[in-house]
Image (cartoon, rainbow, N blue to C red):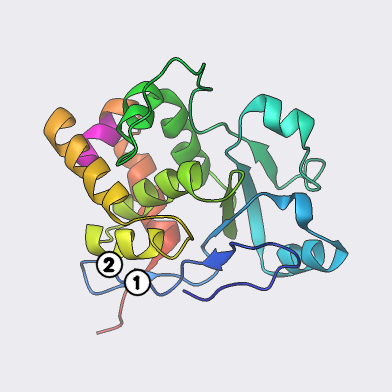
Amino acid sequence: MPRLRWPDLRNARDLGGIPTTDGGWIRERALIRTDNHGRLDAAGLDAVRAYGVARVIDLRWEWEAAKYPSPLAGDERYRLVPACFDPTGDEEIPPDSYRLMADASRDRLAAALTAIAEAPPGGVVLHCHAGRDRTGMVVALALHAAGVAVESIEADYALTEGSPPDMIVNTFAHLTSRYGGVTEYLVGCGLTPGNLAAIRDRLTEVAVR
């Protein structure tokens, strides 16, 4: 999972190389996670474009994107797909899992995953503000759809500063307890079997036997 030198991002990495449970792995340059792109300089923008990126999915809220517009907002690759509801401040946000996001933002999370499934051929970049919570949740669900074990998903999540792996463990436990499993949760959110297959196909490689 190489960290990327896209000046001047602080939390950019390619998820290529993460193993899947069937003996394959996540394809390099297929799924990239980053922090927000406000610090990208000219060299960084060139690096993104040169990396084979076909879609940039901005998971921030609408007001964030309006106040701090992405330097890629005018690019045909860019899509704004807010990953979760905008908290009012009255919610008791759990400190140990993303269960509130999972329960309250099912349609938005489904839209973000659908955007991955329907992206044109090439790499997909996911980002929010710090590249931790919203990005971490969408990446975790996408990796699950691609056939990655929870242990590998939590290991990737923990590479971001301030991201204890128990957040993913507890979130997936909640999805299993309340919805019957992570896949069942995704289907209940509105993802089709075709969407799930498209995510797996675009993100994974299998060993040649």
Sort mark 1 into few (<14), some (14-19) or many (20+) by Cα contacts within 10 Å. many
Of marks 1 and 2, which one's residue comes earlier in the chain? Answer: 2
Can you tell which mark lies on residue 102? none
> Mark 1: which amino acid?
Trp
Q: Residue furthest bottom?
A: 209
Left or right: 90 as drawn, with respect to 67: left
Q: Is residue 32 above or below residue 92?
A: below
Residue 21 x, y percent position in the rendering: 21, 66
Is there CB contact under 8 Å for labels 1 and 2? Answer: yes
Asked whether residue 121 is in view, the answer is no
Q: Residue at x 62, y 44 (%)?
A: 129
Find residue 29 and report its image quarter. Answer: bottom right
Q: Secondary structure at mark 2?
A: loop
Residue 57 x, y percent position in the rendering: 60, 44
Find residue 41 and report its image quarter. Answer: bottom right
Residue range corresponding to the magenta coloring? 181-187
Asked whether residue 122 is in view, the answer is yes
Q: Secondary structure at mark 1?
A: strand
Name the dominant secondary structure of the magenta segment.
Answer: helix
Q: Which residue is mark 1?
A: 25
Sort mark 2 into few (<14), some (14-19) or many (20+) by Cα contacts within 10 Å. some
Q: Residue at x 57, y 55 (%)?
A: 124
Q: Which residue is mark 2?
A: 20
Residue 63 x, y percent position in the rendering: 69, 25
User: Magenta stretch: residue 126 in it?
Assistant: no
> Mark 2: which amino acid?
Thr
Residue 142 x, y percent position in the rendering: 38, 49
Foreground pick, 38 / 207: 38
